[in-house]
Image (cartoon, rainbow, N blue to C red):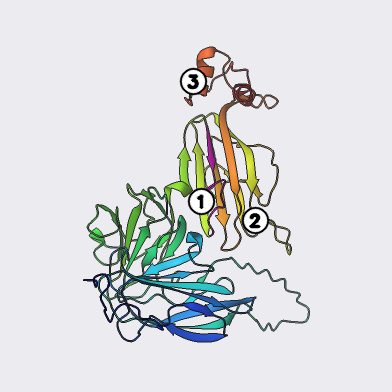
Amino acid sequence: ASPGKGTSHPLLCPPGIKCGGVLSAPSGNFSSPNFPGLYPYETECMWLIVVAEGSSVLLSFSHFELEYHDTCAYDYLQVYNGAARDRGNLLGTFCGHSPPPPFSSAWHVMAVVFHSDRHVAKHGFAAAYRKGSREVWWSLSIHPSIHPSLLFHCPHHPCLLADACGGQLTGLSGEITSPRYPESYPNDAECHWSIGGASGGGPLTLVFADFQMEGGQGCGFDYVALFDGPTVTAPHLGRYCGSARPPRTISSTPHLLIVFKSDFNIGGRGFKAHFYSGECQEVFTTIKGNFSSPQYPNFYPNNLKCQWSIQLPPGYQVKVFFLDMELEGRSSLTGGCDYDHLSAFDGGTENGSLLGQWCGRESLASITSRSNRLLLVLHTDRNTAKRGFSISYVGGCEGEKTRGFLMGQNPKARDQLKHHNLVPCSSGHSSLASTWLSRQT
C-alpha cells in the first residue's frame, strides 16, 4: 500500500534523486530513480535525448523490471521518436520483465518517460544511448564500361535493431511484424501485442499484408491468435497458421490482442500486419458523405496510415470534392510528396490505378473514379504535422461522357439522394447529381 499523507516512506522520491533531464552528450547512460534499488512510488520522469542534427539516437536497455499489467496501466516506460506526449511519436509502452527492443530514432531527438503509481515498486531499468549515423556507405566494384544508376528510398520510420517481440501499441495506426521478418522467425517464441488506448479510439481493424507460417491441423504448432480485447481472456477472434492470409478482422472494442507463438522446430517467413483505429479506417456505402483527417481542423498525429473506402453498388461512380487540404509540403530535394501525402486509388485497393497523390496546401479539382469503389489513403511521417483535410463525395450513375454523373429527375429519386439512400442506376436519368447537390447544399 502507498504511504499515508504526511508520513515518511523510503519509496517516496526524496529531494536530490535524479529523475529525468536533457541528455545532450554524444553517448550516455540513465536509469530509474534509486536503481538498482526499488524505484519510488508516484514518480514521473522524462529524459529528452538530443544529439547532433543529421544523426539518430540509438537506445538500448541492459536491465528492465517494472510492475506488470496487461495494458501497462500502473508502472510503465514509454519511448517516443521525438518529443514526449505526442501519440503519433509513441514507439511503445512497456512494463513487466521483458525489456523493450533496442531502437534507432528517425531523427536526432528521442524521449523516454518513466511512470510509477502508488503501489508495488520494482528495481526499474538501466538504459544506454549513443549518437548514430543515418549515412550508409557502399563500395562498388564495376567494369569501366558499366554505368550504374542507384535509387535509394529512406522512409521516415524508426528501425528496430533487434527482434521486436510484443509490446503495447497506442497509435491510431501502425505496423506489426513477426520477429526477424521477412527472414524466418525464431523457434520457441511467444509475443503479445496489445493494441489500443488511443484517445477517442473506436473499434480496431487488422489487415495482414503477408502471412507464411508452419501449418497443421488445428494450428497446434506455430500460430497467430487474435482476441477481442486487451488480454487472452477476451473473446477469441481466430487462430491462424499456414500460408493463407487471415481475413480482415474488426474488433468490437478499442482493444485488440495479437499473440504469436512458435514451437521448437520448422519456421516460416512470419507475418506483416497493419492496424487502424476507427478514426483512421472508415468504410462508406451511402450515396454521399463527408469525412476528414484525424483531429481535423487541429493538427493530425504523426506516424499514420489511414484509409477511407467508398463502396457503392455496381453501375455507380464516385466523385470526390476537396473542401480543404493542408499537409506537409513537397520535398525540396525531389519536388515530390515524400513526407505526408494523400493518395486516391480506383477500385478500392492500393493495387488499383492511382488517381492522384497530393501534399502541401493546394486547391484541388474534384476527381472521379472509373469504378464503383474508391480508396483514399493518408500517410504521415514522424515529423511536422498540419491541419489535414476535409472531403465530401457523391455517387452517381455512369452516363454519357459529356454529362458525367446522372441521377433521376423524379422527386422520389432526389429525395432518396438527399437522405443518403441509394437508387438503382438505370437508363433515362438525365440530371447531374453533382449539379443537383450544389443547388441543395
Q: Residue 328 has which mark? A: 2
Disc on the earlier residue, 3 or 1: 1
In the rendered image, residue 300 lying in the magenta stretch gets the answer yes
Crowd tier of the residue under label 3, counting other residues whose Cα lies within 10 Å: few below 14, some 14–19, many 20 or above? few
Q: Nearer the viewer, mark 2 or mark 1?
A: 2
Crowd tier of the residue under label 2, counting other residues whose Cα lies within 10 Å: few below 14, some 14–19, many 20 or above? many
Q: Nearer the viewer, mark 3 or mark 2?
A: 2
Provide the residue designation for mark 3: 416
Residue 73 on image: x %, y % = 32, 64
Q: Are marks 3 and 2 in contact (CB under 8 Å)?
A: no
Q: Residue 441 has which mark? A: none
Looking at the rendered image, the quarter that the C terminus falls into is top right
Residue farthest right in this picture: 145
Q: Nearer the viewer, residue 83 or 363?
A: 83
In this picture, residue 138 sits left or right of residue 335: left
Residue farthest front in this picture: 6
Secondary structure beneath dot 3 equals: helix
Residue 134 on image: x %, y % = 61, 77
Q: Amino acid at mark 2?
A: Glu
Q: Is residue 108 above or below residue 29?
A: above
Spatial CA span between label 2 and label 1: 16 Å
In the rendered image, residue 251 lying in the magenta stretch gets the answer no
Q: Is residue 50 above or below residue 295?
A: below
Image: magenta residue range: 289-302
Residue 269 on image: x %, y % = 41, 68
Spatial CA span between label 3 and label 1: 30 Å
In this picture, residue 181 sits left or right of residue 260: right
Secondary structure beneath dot 1 equals: strand
